[in-house]
Amino acid sequence: MLRSFAILTLGCKVNQYESQQIRQLLETLGLAQADPADTAQLVIVNTCCVTHTASAKSRHLINQAQKRGPQAVVICGCLPTVETDELKALGENVHVVKNRCDLAATLSRLVHTESTAPDSARLPPASAGVISPPYLHPADAVIRPESDAKVKCEKDLWPSDELPPLTSFHGQTRAFLKIQDGCDAFCSYCIIPTARPHVRYKNSEEILAEAAALVSAGHKEIVLTGVHIGSYGQTTARRRRWPTPENPHLPALLDQVARIAGLSRIRLSSLDPADVTPALLDVFCSHHNLMPHLHLSLQSGSDAILRRMARPYTADDFRAKVALVRSRLDRPAITTDIIVGFPSETDSDFCQTVALAKEVAFAKMHVFVFSARKGTPAARMQPKIQAEVKKARSRILRELDVILQTQFRSQFLGETAQVLIESANGHAGGRAERYFEVEIAGKPNGTYSAGDIVTTRLEENAADSVLATAICP
Ligand code: SF4
């Protein structure tokens, strides 16, 4: 009998969103989150395979989950979609979900079968190809062969056999809301077009209903997320195939979401520079609840490396988009991702990245050391960069990141900021509109609760946050 579950999650905001959907589905099916987690009878491992390290961590979590001795383990997420061979030698109670469209059905069948049948009648692994749609009583289950994750989905919109929409996002004040899935842009280093090949989007009515439910559950901030949200409303992430070069659908959606009553803050997850259009910025300027923060993936400041990465912009394109953003928003936080040590990256290429980072004055850089991902064109590219060179370049950029973050925060000292409280124990703290962390001093424990929005005066830069005093409440 399955009564309790635990979910182990790796990876991006999309995976975190999907883990919440899994939680909600299992709770609907009558299970409760195990406390402590290692007593769970059902363990879900929601994996990531974006880098070799992520794949290795996923396999480690799978081993740990099996060692806990649960009744069943379900492996889902990106790793099974690209590395099923490595996941074959697993215990009999391990169910590998290769096609994520099958996950809801697999879970509902597993819960029902484990809860009602003797051990001898338990389900074969989901990968054996027997599935039913979610929320059907098992007696009504439709048996059909497992579909192939690599076959292009014909549907524009979200498939019907998905996990449920979220009504709450446990464990954090900021809720992620997936509006889009899939990418077929094939940047040369990225495995995602293999792991999530179907480019599709949720219709706006569903998104608005989900956002309103999250607000009702107490979430004042929502991050609209997806694999490639710039292609929201399109069935491909390749811009050349869009009817118009600028995508009108993301600004239109954002405009609607911003009108939801009680939604105090909205952010977008990662965008390509080309996703930033005058129409999108018009929407940002029209609504006070759209935070002045954009995450624009740069990856490299060298045009030669950007070409080899198959990224669809140049360093000058990036500069132009940053200038456009700055011309419309008040001192926006522009955050980014950068990969160092891409094959053939010379000292000169790297210096161009450093120079562009200084010029843009990023509010935060996520620095990744290139690691060849099997199955991608970049894994075969030469010359490889020596490990110590990659390490040194990463250190230089991380040190620059600390300086740039401090400079970015400094310009707001003496001003007020609204802080969404995330941690209410000890020093209450959270994030300001421009996403930097703020610690509120001088208030006794228990003054605030997670989810409160507090008006503060920003007093002093600390190592990686700003110290502030509360003005109101
Ligand atoms: S745009 Fe490029 S980096 Fe982003 S998910 Fe698609 S292929 Fe990967």
Image (cartoon, rainbow, N blue to C red):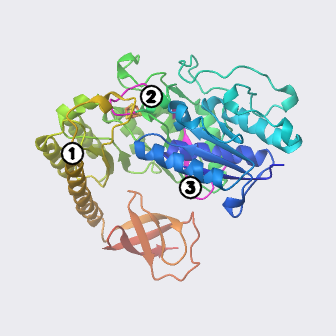
Q: Quadrant of ligand 1?
A: top left
Decide if ligand 1 comes within 8 Å of the CB at mark 2.
yes
The residue tagged 1 is: 386
Q: Is residue 219 visible?
A: yes
Q: Position of residue 236 (x, y in %)?
A: 45, 22
Q: Which SS does the magenta portion mostly show?
A: loop
Tell me which amino acid carries mark 3. Lys
Residue 220 got which mark? Answer: 3
Q: Where is residue 39? Give x, y as percent.
A: 72, 60
* SS at mark 2 in the image: helix
> How far is the residue under mark 2 from the one under mark 3?
32 Å
* Left or right placement of residue 232 versus residue 406 in this view: right
Specify start and end residues of the magenta stretch as a single range.
168-190
For disc 1, the neighbor class at 10 Å (few under 14, some 14 to 19, many from 20) is: few
Q: How many marks?
A: 3
Residue 187 within the segment the image draws in magenta: yes
Amino acid type, callout 2? Pro
Q: Find disc 2 in the rendering and name its residue.
A: 193
Magenta highlight on residue 387: no
Task: Tell me the element at label 1.
Answer: loop
